[in-house]
Each structure stands twice: as structure tokens, then as C-alpha cells.
Image: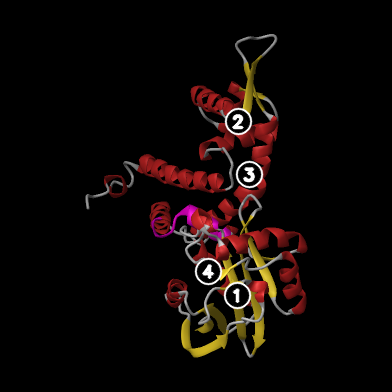
């Protein structure tokens, strides 16, 4: 591997090193904004935030407020015009003056960003830098090493992963998600679908509400996208003596290859640990070899215990085979 000249000549190329670090962080911020469905690039936020803070401003006023050159501000503003986020108009008295104003689209996008993107990016950055101390160059090295180990966007994803108890209003979306994940077919099927040996829906709104009411000690938790839509859910229930049952771990089938299942499982384990849980127990249909192996790689092991499949209860679907049973998996936390 070739030497990193920029890092080696720390004083001579400090500006280039900081620029490289800034570009890396802005690239990660762009990923977070894209995941939230926001059409804003990282480098555009400061200009939008300046207009939000001060109202309509001329190019010169923005340049002064942001301590940047007017050509740079003009270029950035034009790109924002193309995105429909700002409008530029000429002054009635001095045609040379261009006034930049947030459009309604720009204001709405910025408002969403402040609510949905900025808090988790701020949390991710704090995760990288909050405990730093010592000489500046040493701190920069530590930041680079930490971002190489785990990107800002990955840290933001974890910061955004707050599990919340599902509400009654969430039930229709959860039912749709679970049925697509567990019983989807064709292009809509996830890698862990059960449709090959169980047909019909995995659950229904009435059945899910019934289960939630019948087990008040358990909690159906949801994980939301930055947009607010539900992208995952999990059922966690205390069984006594520090043992918890984990079920219905579900990720949107379109996102199952993005590592989100691992993150949701880790967040579920953290949720149990915070409540002094010592062990997690789950059941998996015996034919789901890939899923059993997936859990095994994360520490969930069978101990020979099995449970009967509910052939007499077709509310959970109609089995296509007569050899189904549940394998019990356990993990010590």
C-alpha cells in the first residue's frame, strides 16, 4: 500500500487533510439525507440554514455571513435553484443585486432535515469526537481512524435506531410488513419467506391486536425510517428468571440485504439488557435452515428442545407439509 503523503506531511498539507476529512463526512451526510428521501447535498445545508436564520439575503450578504467567496455562493445558489430549493430574484432598484429566498419546497425539506436528519448526524459526530483531547493533529488522526473503522453514516444509522412500542395506529403497517416478509412470493419475497411450506397471511390486524392484548407483559417494538415509515419490528416478552422471548423479528424485504436485520437484532438485545434480561429464547420453524444458520452466527444455538407446530390453528397460515415443528434457540446475554 502506497504511503499517505497528506498524513505524513502533517503541517505542510494540513489544509488538504482537513478538506479530505470534510469531503468524507459530507459524503456520509449525503447518504443519511438520501435515506430520508431528502434532495439536499451536505454542502448545501449551510446556505439553506443561513437563509432560514436570516430570511432572504443577497449573494454578498450570504457570502459575508458564511465567510465564503461570492463566486462560491453564486455557484451553490444556482444548484439550489435547479433543485427547486431556493429562488433568485433581481432587486427592483439595483439589478446587479441578486436576492436568494427559500422556496416552500426548500423550507419543507429543511424543516424535515432539522427534525429527522440533523439530530442523528449530530449524535454520530459526537460519537466520533466527544472524548477527544490532546494535540490537534493527534485528534485528527483519531477521527480518521474511527471513521475508517465505522463510517459516519453507519453511526448515524445506529443513532437513528430507536425502538418504540407500537401503537394501535401502527398495526396496519406492521401487518403488511410481516406478511410481505414472511409470506411474500416472487419478486416481493424476502430471503426468509415461509411461503414454500405455509400459505396464507402470517397475521392480520385482528389477530395482532388480540395477541398484544392477551400478552400485556410483552411489547411489540417498531423501528422507523428517518421518513417515519416502519422498516422493522420485533416482539419482546419477559418469561421470568431473566429469560425473554424474541419473536416476529421483521425487516422490509426490499432492505433485507443491507445488514438491517443484524442491527435490529442487536438493538433488541440491548433493549432486553437494559431491562436486566440475561437470556433470549426464540422459536424457528425447523425447515428454515438459512434462518437458523443466520441466528447461529449471532450466538443463538439449539439445545435439542422443540415445540409442536399449531396445525389446528389456521389463523397463522395453512401448512403445506405435515412435518413442521419449532426449533428452540437460546442465547445468553
Say how many tags the image has: 4
Q: Would you identify the image quadrant in which residue 268 lies?
A: bottom right
Q: Would you identify the image quadrant in which residue 159 lies?
A: bottom right
For the residues labelled 4 and 1, the Cα–Cα distance comes to 15 Å
For the residues labelled 3 and 1, the Cα–Cα distance comes to 33 Å
Q: Is residue 166 visible?
A: no
Asked whether 250 or 30 is in front, the reply is 250
Q: Residue at x 29, y 46 (%)?
A: 9
Q: Nearer the viewer, mark 4 or mark 1?
A: 4
Q: Position of residue 150 (x, y in %)?
A: 43, 59
Element at badge 2? Answer: helix
Label 1 or label 2, whichever comes before in sequence order: 2
Disc sitting over residue 113 in the figure: 3
Q: Nearer the viewer, mark 3 or mark 2?
A: 3
Q: Which residues are magenta?
A: 148-159
Element at badge 4? Answer: loop
The way the protein has been coloured in the rendering is secondary structure
For the residues labelled 3 and 2, the Cα–Cα distance comes to 21 Å
Q: Position of residue 81 (x, y in %)?
A: 58, 25
- The residue to which callout 1 is attached is 247
Question: Do the residues under discs 4 and 1 have CB atoms within 8 angstroms?
Answer: no
Most common secondary structure along the magenta stretch: helix
- The residue to which callout 4 is attached is 194
Disc sitting over residue 65 in the figure: 2
Magenta stretch holds residue 152: yes
For the residues labelled 3 and 4, the Cα–Cα distance comes to 38 Å
Q: Residue at x 65, y 33 (%)?
A: 106
Element at badge 1? Answer: strand
Q: Is residue 207 visible?
A: yes
For the residues labelled 1 and 2, the Cα–Cα distance comes to 53 Å
Amino acid at each position: 500500500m502506497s504511503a499517505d503523503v497528506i498524513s505524513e506531511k502533517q503541517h505542510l498539507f494540513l489544509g488538504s487533510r482537513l478538506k479530505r476529512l470534510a469531503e468524507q463526512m459530507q459524503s456520509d451526510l449525503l447518504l443519511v439525507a438520501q435515506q430520508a428521501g431528502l434532495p439536499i447535498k451536505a454542502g448545501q445545508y449551510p446556505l439553506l440554514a443561513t437563509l432560514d436564520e436570516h430570511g432572504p439575503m443577497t449573494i454578498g450578504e450570504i457570502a459575508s455571513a458564511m465567510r465564503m467567496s461570492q463566486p462560491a455562493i453564486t455557484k451553490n445558489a444556482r444548484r439550489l435553484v435547479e433543485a427547486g430549493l431556493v429562488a433568485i430574484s433581481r432587486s427592483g432598484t439595483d439589478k446587479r443585486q441578486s436576492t436568494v429566498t427559500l422556496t416552500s419546497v426548500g423550507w419543507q425539506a429543511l424543516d424535515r432535515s432539522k427534525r429527522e436528519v440533523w439530530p442523528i448526524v449530530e449524535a454520530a459526530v459526537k460519537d466520533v469526537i466527544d472524548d477527544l483531547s490532546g494535540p490537534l493533529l493527534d485528534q485528527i488522526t483519531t477521527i480518521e481512524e474511527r471513521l475508517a473503522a465505522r463510517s459516519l453514516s453507519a453511526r448515524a444509522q445506529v443513532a437513528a435506531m430507536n425502538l418504540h412500542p407500537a401503537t394501535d395506529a401502527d398495526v396496519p403497517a406492521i401487518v403488511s410488513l410481516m406478511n410481505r416478509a414472511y409470506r411474500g412470493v416472487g419478486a416481493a419475497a424476502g430471503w426468509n419467506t415461509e411461503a414454500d411450506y405455509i400459505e396464507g397471511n402470517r397475521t392480520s390486524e385482528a389477530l395482532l391486536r388480540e395477541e398484544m392484548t392477551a400478552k400485556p407483559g410483552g411489547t411489540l417494538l417498531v423501528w422507523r425510517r428517518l421518513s417515519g415509515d416502519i422498516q422493522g419490528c420485533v416482539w419482546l416478552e419477559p418469561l421470568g428468571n431473566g429469560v425473554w422471548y424474541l419473536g416476529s423479528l421483521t425487516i422490509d424485504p426490499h432492505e433485507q440485504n443491507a445488514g438491517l436485520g443484524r442491527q435490529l437484532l442487536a438493538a433488541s438485545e440491548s433493549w432486553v439488557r437494559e431491562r436486566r434480561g440475561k437470556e433470549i429464547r426464540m422459536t424457528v420453524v425447523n425447515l428454515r435452515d438459512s434462518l437458523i444458520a443466520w441466528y447461529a452466527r449471532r450466538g443463538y444455538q439449539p439445545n435439542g428442545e422443540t415445540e409442536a407446530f399449531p396445525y389446528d390453528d389456521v389463523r397463522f397460515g395453512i401448512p403445506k407439509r405435515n412435518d413442521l415443528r419449532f426449533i428452540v434457540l437460546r442465547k445468553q446475554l
